[in-house]
Amino acid sequence: MPDNPPLKALPKIPCHVAVIMDGNGRWAKARGLPRIAGHRAGTENLRRVITACVEFGIKYLTIYAFSTENWGRPQEEVSGLMNIIEEVIERELSELHKQGVRLLHLGHLDGLSPNLREKVIKAVALTKNNDRLVLSIAFNYGGRDEIACAIRRMIDEGIKAEDVNETLISKYMFTDGVPDPDLIIRTSGEMRTSNFLIWQAAYSEWYTPQTLWPDFGREELYKAIEEYGKRDRRFGKISSEDYSNNQKPC
Ligand code: IPE
Ligand code: IPE
Ligand code: MG
């Protein structure tokens, strides 16, 4: 059997998929391995998911890799995660560049080691003209921190109160230029935002499979998109079908 057997064409592809890659620790625990082995398995899986996004025609993928709250984990795990992200950039960058992936970073660079900071800046610069898939990595990212940071910048730049509106606020977010996510996937069955894209997710569809992140591959992504295709996104309005039903005489 080929690695990637052909799948039936999907009728509706979300433009932007965001993923809370959760469950690495539980994946490792279930195998009697140290948590860091779960994080490594998680990065292996990331490659599969990126390739599948390109295959399915998804234009924007955002992944939550390290939250502002994750600094509170034991020092050993934090430094392990920092090393992994550095290794991943080093190992994957040229292949991602070849695949036409543009890399963006969401979050703060300060707080990261000078080496890692430099690698992130270089990766973003190298891939800036690619347009097959925009891959945003939320790393040292928190949604509340992003909003606080946006307010600080608006005040610093002397924005007048009467000019503050939703469009302007969006421009001050780390995600400026990236459309709001259509679909947010959180693996491992947890059902909370954990501070991810809390401004941008106002009308995103959620999908929360039990599958742990290292096991969430191409077929699972396909199922998520299939499920997304069945959702009726009303954005607070009513569907056109319900509207015409309402007009029918009783
Ligand atoms: C997600 O996996 C990865 C990061 C938060 C960096 P976890 O490490 O949260 O895995 P669980 O939730 O403990 O299984
Ligand atoms: C969210 O997962 C952060 C990332 C996946 C990077 P966590 O595992 O840190 O979230 P909580 O603690 O379960 O809410
Ligand atoms: Mg977790």
Image (tube, rainbow, N blue to C red):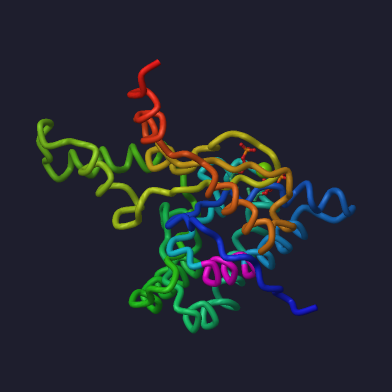
Q: Quadrant of the C terminus?
A: top left
Quarter of the N terminus within the rendering: bottom right
In the image shown, does 78 or 54 lie closer to the viewer?
Answer: 54
- The residue lying toward the viewer, choosing from 151 and 193, is 193
Q: Position of residue 248 (x, y in %)?
A: 36, 23
- Residue 15 located left or right of residue 49: left
The residue positioned 50% from the left and 41% from the top of the image is 205
Residue farthest along the front direction in this orientation: 249
Give the image location of residue 184, x and y in percent: 52, 46
What residue is rendered at 62% in x and 34% in y? 191
Along the horizontal axis of the image, is 245 left or right of 98? left
Q: Nearer the viewer, residue 247 or 81?
A: 247
Residue farthest along the top direction in this orientation? 250
Seen in the picture, residue 184 relative to 127 is either above or below; the reply is: above
Please report the bounds of the magenta region as a residue range: 47-56
Q: Is-magenta flag for residue 55?
A: yes
Q: Is residue 65 magenta?
A: no
Q: For residue 72, what is the image quadrant? A: top right
Residue depicted at x 47% and y 80%: 97
Q: Is residue 85 left or right of residue 4?
A: left
Question: Is 140 situated above or below 7?
Answer: above
Look at the picture and state if 244 lies above or below 14: above
The dominant secondary structure in magenta is helix
